[in-house]
Image (spheres, helix red, strand yellow):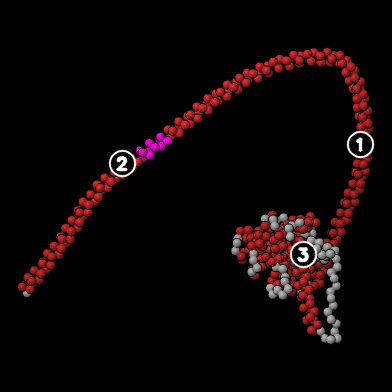
């Protein structure tokens, strides 16, 4: 064991010595390579400095030659310019001397001429004074006579004017008295009529209350009473935000602020209901400037189904505004409003055999009805007729709709002929359209029997627009 341990120790010591020798050899190689690199870098830097010095001297020599050449060229140019300047100064001096001599001659001639003019002026003034003294007496006599005539004439004119003014004032006072009597009579008649109307209205209200009381007493059933109680409970639970004006304000805010499709559609639905039921909501919508936003929204939509729904509600809102006389002008006053409506008619026109006509039919008829309402005013109709190509577009749309209606009628006639019996009566042609008086167009909150309803027939709608354009007799 001892000899084995000695052998192991000897081997380990030899291995350690060899490792140390290898490390020292590697370190010596590294030191030698670093030193040799340092020596080479020093030599390269000395050589580089020498080359830079030589380059600097060569460039300085070249620059000196170029500067000398430039100096020679500049010197020759300066000498030439100096020669030209000296010649110009000499010529200028000679010209000024000639002008000075000419001025002296001219001033002398002017002096003699002025002296002659002074002498002539003094002589003429003496002759004129002598003649004026001779004629002054005659002039004064003529002036006195003319002034007396004019004063007499003015006196007579003033006298006639005063007489006429007195007559006019007396007539005015008489007419004023008569007018006051007539006004008093009319006011008394108006007040008595107003009192009668107030009494009559009170009697009618009392009658209405009594009839309502009798009707409720006679017709009250448990079902009607329950409905009335439910209405009262609903009215008690109504919050402030459920009021129509507040909903209108929120809808206008959504329409002006948000760009999401669902928000815009919900806002248009609320605005359609509000403008259909309340004139105050119509005025608030116009004052907020939302009409321009609605037209911009219409112009930005395409023919997709959601966009068509948005356009339908937007056109219905504009239609409700145009029915109210206070907001009709606001709809028409939007920039390019008529062109936008004409573009809608062109896009959603109904063609023969069109399979998707039902989707855009309501847009077409509503737009026609809106145009017909806007063109009821003669001034607006004249302005629209003067628009470029507006009449041609309406004429082409009218003929296209009429042709489609004719084809649909023929198709219906063919179907009826196939279905009727041989002994039955066949389809008769419709009578031509007769000219009728212009119907009364009023908002939905006006309950009148003679109020015109919205048009749903495309041919009738385009005929209304063509009548406004005077295209159809």
Residue 289 image offset from top left, x and y in percent: 67, 55
- 1 vs 2, front mark: 2
Q: What label does residue 57 carry, if any? A: 2
Residue underneath mark 1:
169
Quarter of the rendering occupied by the C terminus:
bottom right
* Mark pair 1, 2: CA separation: 117 Å
Callout 2: few (<14), some (14-19), or many (20+) C-alpha neighbours within 10 Å? few
Callout 1: few (<14), some (14-19), or many (20+) C-alpha neighbours within 10 Å? few
* Mark pair 3, 1: CA separation: 63 Å
Would you place residue 391 above or below residue 103 in this image?
below
Residue underneath mark 3:
395
Residue 336 visible in this rendered orientation of the protein: yes
Q: What label does residue 135 carry, if any? A: none
Q: Which residues are magenta?
A: 63-73
- 3 vs 1, front mark: 3
Residue at the location (84% across, 59% down)? 202
Mark 3 vs mark 1: which is more N-terminal? 1
Asked which quadrant contains residue 156, the reply is top right
Frontmost residue, 120 versus 344: 120
Frontmost residue, 232 versus 337: 337
Residue 94 image offset from top left, x and y in percent: 56, 23
């Amino acid at each position: 064991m001892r000899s084995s341990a000695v052998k192991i120790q000897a081997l380990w010591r030899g291995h350690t010595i060899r490792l140390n020798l290898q490390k020292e050899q590697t370190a010596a190689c590294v030191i030698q390579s670093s030193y040799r690199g340092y020596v080479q870098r020093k030599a390269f830097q000395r050589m580089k400095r020498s080359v830079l010095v030589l380059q600097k001297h060569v460039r300085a020599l070249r620059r000196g030659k170029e500067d000398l050449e430039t100096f020679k060229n500049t010197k020759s140019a300066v000498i030439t310019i100096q020669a030209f300047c000296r010649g110009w100064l000499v010529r200028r001096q000679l010209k000024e001397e000639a002008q000075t001599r000419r001025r002296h001659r001219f001033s002398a001639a002017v002096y003699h001429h002025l002296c002659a003019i002074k002498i002539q002026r003094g002589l003429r003034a003496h002759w004129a004074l002598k003649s004026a003294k001779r004629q002054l007496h005659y002039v004064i006599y003529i002036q006195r006579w003319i002034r007396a005539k004019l004063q007499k004439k003015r006196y007579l004119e003033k006298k006639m004017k005063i007489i006429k003014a007195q007559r006019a004032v007396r007539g005015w006072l008489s007419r004023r008295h008569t007018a006051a009597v007539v006004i008093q009579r009319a006011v008394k008649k108006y007040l008595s009529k107003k009192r009668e109307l107030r009494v009559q209205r009170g009697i009618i209200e009392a009658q209405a209350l009594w009839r309502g009381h009798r009707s409720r007493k006679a017709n009250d059933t448990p079902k009607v009473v329950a409905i009335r109680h439910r209405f009262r409970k609903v009215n008690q639970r109504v919050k402030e935000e459920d009021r129509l004006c507040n909903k209108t304000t929120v809808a206008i805010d959504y329409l002006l602020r948000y760009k999401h499709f669902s928000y815009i559609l919900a806002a248009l639905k609320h605005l359609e209901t509000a403008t259909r039921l309340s004139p105050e909501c119509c005025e608030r919508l116009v004052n907020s400037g939302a009409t321009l936003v609605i037209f911009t929204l219409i112009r930005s939509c395409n023919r997709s189904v959601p966009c068509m729904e948005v356009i339908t509600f937007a056109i219905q809102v504009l239609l409700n505004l145009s029915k109210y006389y206070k907001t009709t002008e606001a709809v028409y006053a939007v920039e390019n409003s008529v062109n936008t409506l004409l573009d809608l008619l062109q896009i959603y026109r109904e063609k023969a055999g069109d399979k998707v006509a039902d989707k855009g039919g309501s847009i077409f008829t509503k737009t026609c009805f809106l145009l017909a309402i806007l063109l009821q005013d003669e001034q607006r109709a004249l302005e629209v007729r003067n628009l470029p190509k507006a009449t041609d577009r309406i004429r082409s749309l009218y003929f296209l709709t009429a042709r489609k209606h004719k084809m649909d009628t023929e198709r219906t006639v063919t179907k009826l002929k196939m279905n009727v019996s041989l002994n039955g009566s066949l389809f008769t042609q419709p009578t031509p359209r007769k000219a009728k008086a212009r119907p009364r167009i009023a908002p939905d909150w006006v309950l009148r029997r003679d109020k015109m309803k919205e048009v749903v027939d495309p041919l009738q709608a385009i005929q209304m627009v063509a009548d406004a354009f005077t295209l159809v007799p």
